[in-house]
Image: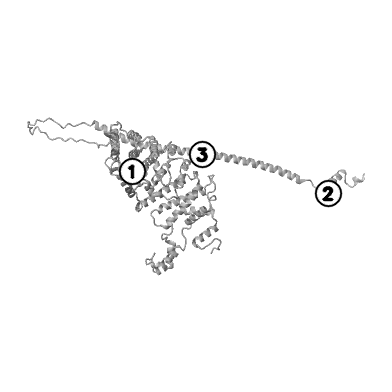
Amino acid sequence: MDQDNIDGFDDFDDQELDNQLVALTGPPPDKDMMLQGENSILRSKIESINRTHDKEIKGIHDRFQQALKKQETNMGALNEQIESLKNDIVRLEDEKKFLKNEKQSLHQEYLNSKKRKISSTQSVDNTTDLSSSQIGNPSTTIIHYLPVLPNEKSLFLEHVTNLSISGLNYCTLDILEKFSHIAPQKTLKDFILGSLINCNLERLDELVSFYLQLLLDVLNTQDEPIVISLILSLINSGISYRPAALKGQLDIVEQVCDKILHYIGVFKKYTKLVELFEPVYTNLQDEYLKKLAVVYAMDTLVTISRVFEFHGLEKDIIERLDRFPVSTQTPVKLLINYLDILESISSEARLGTYLVPFVRLLNVQMDSIKSYNMYGLNDQLGNNNDVQLLKTILFGLPQALSPISLSTFEQLTNYDSDGQFISRFNMNVLQFKLKALKLMQKAQFQLQSNDIIPELCKLIGIQQNYITRFPRCHSNHLRLKLINVMIETIHTRVYDQTSNLPDAISTLPSEVLADLIVVLAKITFSKIPNLHTSFCEFGHDLRLKKRNRVPLIQDFKETNPTQLYYLEIETSNGLEVPYDDKTIELSKDILGKYVTSEDADELYDSILNPSFRPGQDHV
């Protein structure tokens, strides 16, 4: 037996030991390279999964946006259909009422035609004496009379005949009879009434259509401003008499617009009274009547816009009114009418285009002397002096227009001494600005909002200063409404996330930004401590020096600290502006976006202490 076999080990065991020795003493395998390869594979798989995930998310987002746009489009179409159906329902209800009245009127006429006539005449021989036996008991006949209802034609004729101009005691047709003739022996009044009476029309819609077409034909043949004004008043009354009876008399719009543009030049340039002796302006009454024709034409267009809503005619209307002179010389009455017409436009984009000229009128002082203030057809905004001026022109001479002297004209148009008229005029100006601001708020993103903000900031400052100077003025409620609308407009523009315009505040000049912060701070810090206390102490010092004997408040409140504190906290005393809570919150939001807390503290301290300078330590 060999020695190898004796010790119990064979060759296979040696080989196994060699392998174990090599494994223990040899270099380690390159596991890092293996791990890096696996990591690369996993990373590529993760990136592939992420790309697939992002692609799916983008696809889902795109499909969602498409579905959302489609839904918005469908909702817009449905809303338009709903509005159209609502308008159709209103129109059908009006037609139902109209046909019901027509049916009742025709039924009454039918009953009257079928009513038997009772013969009350009998041939009695006066020489024959009737015995008592021949005379029977008197019989009583009871006849049931139905109430006689006037038909629509008679009511409409009565309406046309009794129509008058505000402030005048004469009917419109009577004035028209004095100044217009279509034949030597036939006046325009006789022609209009005769045509209405002789026409064989009983339905009100046909009658009104015939009446309006008759007036339009007459309007095309007249050149005198007074006649045109009176005919326009008749057209306006015919449209507003029964709007449900009209079926789209839209040809009125074109002819009325032509009359506006024909005489609109009288408002383009204001000429001083001392220059009216030039040959073109020597006829003062003619200039006045041209202005009257434009005022009546604008009122008629407003009535048309309310009745017909300019369906399909917005472009034609605006193209004609685009030449309308929007300036400080334009009467406030016409500017308000122009805004009423713009309200009938359904497209906000087109609306914003035509509101641009009104932006520069927000901070311009409008003079009441530069515009005649005659009464219109749809409102009672006017002056009695202009009524007297119109009476002088119309009835000064029996058969013609009465010429006006310069002294009479100056006397009747001198409004400086009429405080009540000036107050009403200022109210009209505020109403015009409020209406313009509301329309601008509706279409502000179609306007250059960054150009509007400086004008709004300036207007807010003007209104705040006026309220501070005259805290008990009757027009302050309108001024506060103006401030509310302007703050809402600025806030909406600042926090808008949908428009592509640059930031509304960051692009403003530094001067405008400073003014904006000041006006917003006046609203945000409307209640400032120590204001009432210092005011009461100042009044007390004046009384001690016997410069003011009448106390501003009760005597005991001037020196009692508790009463002074009560005045400071609870009583405004006419020094605090009653801003709406919403306006204050919106002002805080705007300030909070562009002013830091330290800036706000410095601004607050500078208001409390005028000697405070930024950079000082706060107490």
> Does 609 sit above or below residue 319?
below
First of labels 3, 1 by sequence position: 3
Circle 3 sits on which residue?
Answer: 71
Q: Which mark is residue 25?
A: 2
Task: Say what amino acid the circle numbered 1 marks.
Answer: Gln
Circle 1 sits on which residue?
Answer: 285
In the depicted view, which residue is nearer to us: 584 or 380? Answer: 380
Contact, CB < 8 Å: mark 3 with mark 1?
no
Contact, CB < 8 Å: mark 2 with mark 1?
no
Where is residue 238 drawn, in percent x and y? 33, 38
Badge 3 crowding class, 10 Å Cα cut-off, few under 14, some 14 to 19, many 20 or more, is few
Label 2 and label 1: CA atoms lie apart by 126 Å
Q: Secondary structure at mark 1?
A: helix
Relative side of 400 to 15, left or right: left
Q: Secondary structure at mark 2?
A: helix
Q: Secondary structure at mark 3?
A: helix
Where is residue 267 drawn, in percent x and y? 40, 44
Where is residue 210 drawn, in percent x and y? 33, 33
Task: Say what amino acid the circle numbered 2 marks.
Answer: Thr
In the depicted view, which residue is nearer to us: 85 or 440? Answer: 440
Q: Which mark is residue 430?
A: none
The quadrant holding residue 543 is: bottom left
Label 3 and label 2: CA atoms lie apart by 75 Å
- Residue 260 visible at all: yes
